[in-house]
């Protein structure tokens, strides 16, 4: 899709999550410059316009360092669901936005700049493929284990979008058909067993008592710390999540003939406490010769991965951006 | 990859299964001309060379109708596993071939003709995408429920090969982690619950007594017939398989954002006895909005699908053939 001489101007990258909004310039080598972060507005005052003005101000702050003509475009990684590639958002964790036309509003607010958007988990996986733990691999699944369980897929050296930009929802692979109810309405989805809140709820039911409520976003971090200290219920909770992740990863590896599976998100920071039982579970469930070759590895880019991926929607558009010309 | 004027010569297509070998000319519109079929040689005499001479004779018979120069190439759909695209076969159900270099042997036997090979389930899905139930769809899973459970994937209008040509193994998506042992060494794979032999074994354990052994390849057909007549154990066996297929299809639909799932193979001929509980199971397990739009439909091409798909490895090579120049 690239025409003419390669456009090496930086991208104004934005990462919109339920916890924080981030923006930065990302250059053509994937370097993140001058990142700015604010907490996601919450509560009754956080209506659609307040949320949008926070995003616009963040972008203007970053743009204050360069002339707009020196920027190639705006790349957005956002929590979903959204209609894609139109970028109309109804994020579960940002209740102020329902059917909010974020992409159109940014096109209006920053005339002359193209705006491309994709799911935040997808952008994280793009970032890891372009500049992180998946560099040089042609077939990979990336997953984000955090408040939810999301992901993205690169197969045959191309991002897989699916029919409507939703490919990569590893959190809704079914690992225990009679298992716990999932937020989606199904039961036994990976997310119902391995998301941070799901793990904490289970541990709480088994008698784990953190210094906070089990629904606190920080509870999963406390649980991982307790597991690292050898607290038996916390350890069992991490093993149960790892077992479920191993099953879902085995299903995906056998269905897709992957090379590598990258695990990121808050919970992945637990290290061997998570990865060691995950590896055991995966090895027990993935028995086909080709699936046994798959490596399960931690993400490498940390909190910048989504920004880097959002920029790659431009710098490597043949690989990561298939909707066609910018509207 | 096509250069120069489009090559409209027919392809010599071959379908090698555990039950029969078939060959035909397939023209550029997907028509199958002069198909020939023989039973797959079995027993002690069916060594590697006997098997190969049967294949070669079948091809020569088909070629006797045209000059070799009027044929574009040889396209093979074969049971696996195989190394791909090299086409070195070790098919589970053809014990006479172990590490048999079928592709190289055919290159040697038919000098001047290129030889392309892919997994038989993959070719069936290609055939259904090119000329059957998946026509015009960009994102589909095709599955073959028979002696085993195989499949293939088209995503973003391209065949997905995976790292080594093994993508599409829906039979080894895990649907019941503590379920029955699978031939692969794992447990609770879809194939361990829904293949013809798996269904018959379960029904036999519940008291079903067909007029043949439960391991007879025809037993599944008898079971489907008994289910159609309302025999309770046979009905329960079909429902149990359909439940498992629905779970695996829901996992795949949510992971991949599919448009359509095509179900073929012997068992799919059971019709509503299979498809009705399959649809129920799928609807119960696939709850995300985008997954609920997926249609689960029967295959349309019947026994010719593999031949048609093997020919499409040439006629639609940009979509279905990615290994690069013929060696």
Image (cartoon, coloured by chain):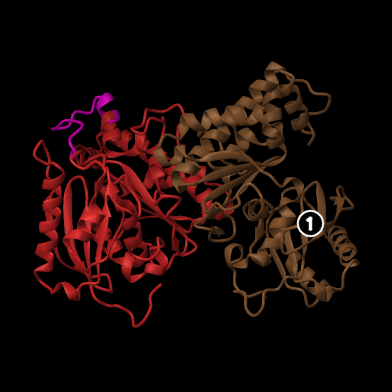
Chain colours: A brown, B red
Q: Is residue A101 above or below residue A154?
A: below
Residue B67 colored in magenta in the image: no
Seen at 45% across and 50% down, the residue is: B163
Magenta highlight: main SS: loop
Along the line of sight, the residue nearer the viewer: B214 or B112: B112
Q: Is residue A60 left or right of residue A115?
A: right
Where residue A49 sits in the image (x, y, percent)? 85, 62
Judge whether residue A145 can be spotted in this image: yes
Quadrant location of the C terminus of chain A in the rendered image = bottom right
Along the line of sight, the residue nearer the viewer: B5 or A191: B5
Determine the image quadrant of residue A217: top right
Where residue A209 sits in the image (x, y, percent)? 78, 20
Seen at 18% across and 40% down, the residue is: B96
Label 1 neighbourhood size at 10 Å, few (<14), some (14-19), many (20+)? Answer: many
What residue range appears in magenta? B202-218
Number of marks? 1
Q: Which residue is mark 1?
A: A32
Disc 1, SS: strand
Judge whether residue B40 can be spotted in this image: no
Q: Is residue B123 left or right of residue A148?
A: left
Determine the image quadrant of residue B317: bottom left
Quadrant location of the N terminus of chain A in the rendered image = bottom right
Along the line of sight, the residue nearer the viewer: A214 or A128: A128
Where residue A138 sits in the image (x, y, percent)? 52, 54
Q: Residue furthest bottom?
A: B5
Where residue B197 sits in the image (x, y, percent)? 26, 35
């Amino acid at each position: 899709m690239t025409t003419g001489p390669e456009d090496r101007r930086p991208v104004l990258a934005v990462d919109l999550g339920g916890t924080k909004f981030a923006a930065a310039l990302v250059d053509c080598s994937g370097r993140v410059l001058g990142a700015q972060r604010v907490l996601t507005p919450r509560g009754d005052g956080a209506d659609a316009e307040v949320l949008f003005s926070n995003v616009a101000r963040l972008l203007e702050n970053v743009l204050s360092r360069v002339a707009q003509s020196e920027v190639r475009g705006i790349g957005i990684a956002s929590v979903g669901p959204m209609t894609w590639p139109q970028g109309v958002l109804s994020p579960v964790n940002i209740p102020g936005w329902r059917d909010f036309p974020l992409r159109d509003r940014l096109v209006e607010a920053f005339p002359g700049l193209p705006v491309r958007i994709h799911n935040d988990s997808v952008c994280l996986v793009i970032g890891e493929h372009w500049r992180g733990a998946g560099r040089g691999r042609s077939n990979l699944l990336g997953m984000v284990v955090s408040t939810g369980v999301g992901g993205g897929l690169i197969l045959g050296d191309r991002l897989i979008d699916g029919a409507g930009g939703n490919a990569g929802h590893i959190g809704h692979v079914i690992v225990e058909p009679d298992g716990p109810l999932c937020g989606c309405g199904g039961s036994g989805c990976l997310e119902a067993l391995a998301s941070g809140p799901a793990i904490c709820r289970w541990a709480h039911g088994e008698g784990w008592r953190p210094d906070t409520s089990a629904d606190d976003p920080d509870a999963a971090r406390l649980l991982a710390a307790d597991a690292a200290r050898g607290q038996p219920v916390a350890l069992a909770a991490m093993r149960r999540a790892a077992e479920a992740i191993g099953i879902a990863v085995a299903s995906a590896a056998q269905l897709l003939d992957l090379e590598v599976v990258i695990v990121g998100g808050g919970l992945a920071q637990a290290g061997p406490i998570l990865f060691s039982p995950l590896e055991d579970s995966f090895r027990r469930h993935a028995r086909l010769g080709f699936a046994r070759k798959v490596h399960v590895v931690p993400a490498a880019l940390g909190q910048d991965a989504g920004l880097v991926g959002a920029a790659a929607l431009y710098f490597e558009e043949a690989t990561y951006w298939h909707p066609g010309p910018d509207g």
